[in-house]
């Protein structure tokens, strides 16, 4: 296991409500990522972080915001959830070292927006 | 950024070797080949990676052709627990380039009793 904890693991919410997913790592890795995975699509990057308070947009960032106030925590927020944001969300981490830059994933958070 | 092509599905008998191919004909000289797998309802799991040379670890072997345009992941003795979707991706060298990874749909491997 890569020392990544996602919470909540499962959530059902109503359209228009705010939702925050949390990713917590114990590896002290610099880089953190949020992906979503939907049928018929590969993993798609939502946002990523390259350090505390340093974040940038990914491929599918519309409707999402992120924050990283501590190295170990990366939060993904849906300000006003929509049915199109029903998905499974994966957090990932990586470090930049001479031995490589392998990315490791959490176990996922299943979000249903009704 | 280089993309990969994989067959959508494969079957393998339990106990036999599973050979999963991947085409990455546009790979650049500084791009690594990575393999991950995703067992149903779990997060993707790292398997192995390589640049030019063949690699082996406790999970699998990676064979990269000399021209680097294709590779094969080998699971030497497949078990039912190896049933999963296998992803082949290429990654540019350099810090922070994981943001450029392109994840396709992978190969769905079914290991049959």
Image (spheres, coloured by chain):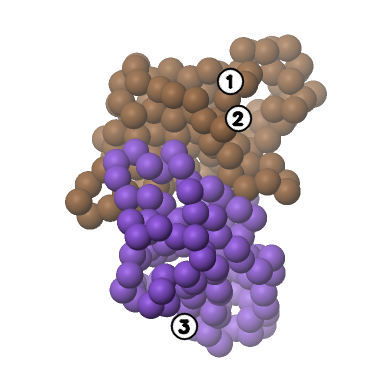
Chain colours: A brown, B purple
Image spot of residue B97 (x, y percent): 38, 42
Q: Above or below — where is B15 with respect to A38?
A: below
Q: Nearer the viewer, residue A13 or A98?
A: A98
Give the residue at the far bottom of this rendering. Answer: B16
- How would you rate the neighbour count of disc 3 (Cα within 10 Å): few for under 14, some for 14-19, many for 20 or more? some
Image spot of residue B93 (x, y percent): 32, 50
* Residue positioned 39% across, 33% down in the render: A32
Query: Which quarter shows the C terminus of chain A?
Result: top right
Q: Is residue A1 visible?
A: no
Q: Above or below — where is B102 with respect to B5?
A: above
Helix, strand, or loop for circle 3?
loop
| Residue carrying label 1 | A64
Image spot of residue A28 (x, y percent): 26, 35
Give residue B76's mark: 3
Of marks 2 and 1, the one in the foreground = 2
Helix, strand, or loop for circle 2?
loop
């Amino acid at each position: 296991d890569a020392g990544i904890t996602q919470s909540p693991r499962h959530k059902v919410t109503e359209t228009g409500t705010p939702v925050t997913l949390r990713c917590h790592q114990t590896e002290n890795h610099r880089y953190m990522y949020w992906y979503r995975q939907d049928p018929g699509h590969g993993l798609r990057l939502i946002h990523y972080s390259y350090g505390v308070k340093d974040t940038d947009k990914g491929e599918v960032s519309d409707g999402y915001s992120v924050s990283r106030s501590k190295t170990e925590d990366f939060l993904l927020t849906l300000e006003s959830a929509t049915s199109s944001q029903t998905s499974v969300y994966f957090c990932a981490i990586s470090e930049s070292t001479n031995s490589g830059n392998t990315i490791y994933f959490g176990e996922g958070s299943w979000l249903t927006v009704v | 950024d280089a993309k990969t092509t994989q067959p959508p599905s494969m079957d393998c008998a339990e106990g036999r070797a599973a050979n999963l191919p991947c085409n990455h004909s546009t790979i650049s000289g500084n791009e690594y080949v990575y393999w991950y797998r995703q067992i149903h309802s779990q997060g993707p799991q790292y398997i192995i990676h390589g640049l030019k040379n063949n690699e082996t670890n406790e999970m699998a072997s990676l064979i990269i052709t000399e021209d680097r345009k294709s590779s094969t992941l080998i699971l030497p003795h497949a078990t039912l627990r190896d049933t999963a979707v296998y992803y082949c991706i290429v990654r540019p060298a350099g810090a922070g380039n994981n943001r450029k990874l392109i994840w396709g749909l992978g190969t769905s491997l079914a290991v049959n009793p």
